Image (tube, helix red, strand yellow):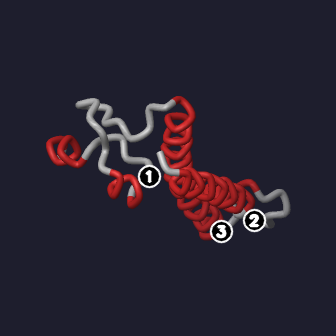
């Protein structure tokens, strides 16, 4: 498969890793210097901030898993093969969605 797609995936992986690090450092619950008073409003604010960051980090981690899986398939020679029908995934589809696991036909059937 094209070197351009591999470069795109590698760049996305680096970006995702950086975003994960930033969100981890911004988690108010993990901040050792966090000065939280014992008011319920402060506790709620910190908890809500933590929940938002955890949800975002979960999405980023899932995306990172998908990117790593696509890179593994490139290395092993199975990239661009539909996981359902074993047919080829259209090159244009992979350029738009490099982590696609299904061809457009199988994706449409699944939805």
Task: Mark 1: give few (<14), some (14-19) or many (20+) Cα within 10 Å.
Answer: many
In 3D space, how far apart are the residues under numbered discs 2 and 1 (Cα atoms)?
A: 43 Å
Give the left or right position of residue 37, taking residue 43 as reference: right
Question: Do the residues bearing badges 3 and 2 touch, measured as CB atoms within 8 Å?
Answer: yes
Mark 2 element type: loop
Residue lying farthest front? Answer: 2
Pointer 2: residues within 10 angstroms few (<14), some, or many (20+)?
some
C-alpha span from label 1 to label 3: 42 Å
SS at badge 1? loop
> Mark on residue 42?
3
Relative to the observer, which residue lies in front, 88 or 35? 88
Residue pictured at 75% horizontal, 65% vertical: 36
The disc at residue 98 is 1
Disc number for residue 36: 2
Residue 45: where, in percent of width, then height? Answer: 60, 68
Image position, residue 25 (x, y; %) = 74, 60
> In the figure, 16 relative to 80: above or below?
below
The secondary structure type at the circle numbered 3 is helix
- The answer to which image quadrant residue 26 occupies is bottom right
Q: Residue at x 37, y 47 (%)?
A: 100
> Is 20 located above or below residue 36 in the figure?
above
């Amino acid at each position: 498969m094209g070197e351009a797609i591999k470069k795109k995936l590698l760049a996305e992986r680096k970006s995702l890793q950086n975003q994960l690090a930033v969100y981890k450092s911004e988690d108010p619950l993990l901040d050792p210097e966090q000065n939280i008073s014992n008011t319920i409003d402060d506790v709620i604010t910190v908890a809500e901030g933590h929940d938002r960051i955890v949800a975002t980090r979960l999405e980023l981690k899932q995306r990172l898993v998908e990117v790593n899986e696509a890179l593994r398939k490139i290395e092993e020679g199975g990239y661009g093969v539909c996981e359902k029908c074993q047919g080829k995934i259209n090159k244009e589809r992979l350029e738009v969605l490099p982590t696609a696991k299904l061809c457009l036909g199988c994706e449409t059937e699944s939805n």
